[in-house]
Image (tube, rainbow, N blue to C red):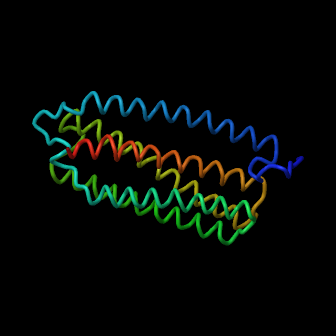
């Protein structure tokens, strides 16, 4: 395996470059998935039937907590990748761990939010609006859950193998995924919650 030392470690081999390129293609498919979910949500947002509207069930404080946790985790994963690039394994693992803890906090807040909606009578069967809302939020939450397990496996690999071209590549690809989830959340925050609260 020939390593090109003029490039960052995660791009250092031909195979690594191809994996990163392939992951960008995967993210293109993910964009299509979330674009479809947003299109469905915006089509059904006023189809509330006898159920609650967004302004009746949305509360700003948990949404602000979720946003703070996820955006902060985007910053910490960036710090983890920086630490990886300068070869600081301990700092990399620390920032990776902080990222996952913040992600877990986000997920816990989102689950609490879902339970609150259900308590208020907003379930999948309530209306087309609530069904589209929960599907959009749930899909994003499922992606965060997958990311938590993925990130944990990467931490375990880095701990065992150190910072190698392979673990660097996996870590960088994970960071792309995590940043993507943050961007999707910004759209959810802006166009679902803030618009719904108006």
Report the residue at 25% width, 55% height from top. 60
Identity of the residue furthest to the right in this view: 2
* Residue situated in front as seen by the camera: 188 or 148: 188
Q: Nearer the viewer, residue 108 or 85?
A: 85
Q: Which quarter of the figure is the C terminus placed in?
A: top left
Q: How far across and how far down the image is residue 100, in percent? A: 51, 62
Up/down of 113 relative to 184, above or below: below
The spot of residue 72 in percent (x, y) is 47, 61
Residue 89, image quadrant:
bottom right
On the image, the x and y values in percent for residue 1 come to 88, 47
Q: Position of 117 compared to 169: left or right?
A: left
Residue 137 shown left or right of residue 171 in the figure: left
Residue 63 lies left or right of residue 68; in this view the side is left
Q: How many marks?
A: 0
Q: Nearer the viewer, residue 87 or 156?
A: 87
Q: Estimate the x, y position of residue 187 in percent, counting from the top left.
A: 39, 42
At horizontal 53% and vertical 52% (from top left) the residue drawn is 147
With respect to residue 18, does 67 lie above or below? below
Rendered residue at 16%/35% (across/down): 48
Q: Residue at x 89, y 47 (%)?
A: 2
Q: Quarter-wise, where is residue 168 in the image?
A: bottom right
Vertical placement of residue 43 versus 174, above or below: above
Q: Quadrant of residue 85?
A: bottom right
Farthest bottom residue in view? 90
Q: Is residue 51 left or right of residue 189?
A: left
């Amino acid at each position: 395996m020939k390593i090109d030392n003029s490039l960052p470690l995660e791009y250092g081999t031909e195979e690594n470059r191809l994996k990163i390129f392939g992951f960008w293609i995967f993210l293109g498919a993910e964009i299509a998935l979330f674009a479809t979910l947003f299109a469905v949500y915006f089509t059904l947002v006023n189809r509330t039937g006898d159920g609650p509207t967004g302004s009746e069930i949305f509360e700003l404080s948990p949404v602000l907590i979720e946003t703070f946790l996820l955006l902060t985790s985007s910053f910490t994963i960036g710090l983890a990748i920086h630490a990886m690039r300068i070869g600081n394994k301990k700092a990399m693992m620390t920032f990776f761990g902080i990222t996952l803890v913040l992600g877990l906090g986000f997920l816990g807040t989102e689950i609490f939010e879902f339970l609150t909606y259900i308590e208020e009578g907003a379930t999948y069967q309530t209306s087309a609006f609530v069904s589209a809302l929960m599907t959009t939020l749930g899909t994003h939450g499922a992606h965060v859950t997958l990311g938590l397990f993925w990130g944990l496996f990467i931490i375990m690999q880095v701990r065992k193998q150190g910072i190698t071209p392979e673990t660097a590549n996996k870590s960088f690809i994970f960071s792309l995924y995590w940043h993507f989830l943050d961007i999707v959340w910004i759209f959810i925050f802006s166009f679902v919650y803030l618009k719904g609260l108006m």
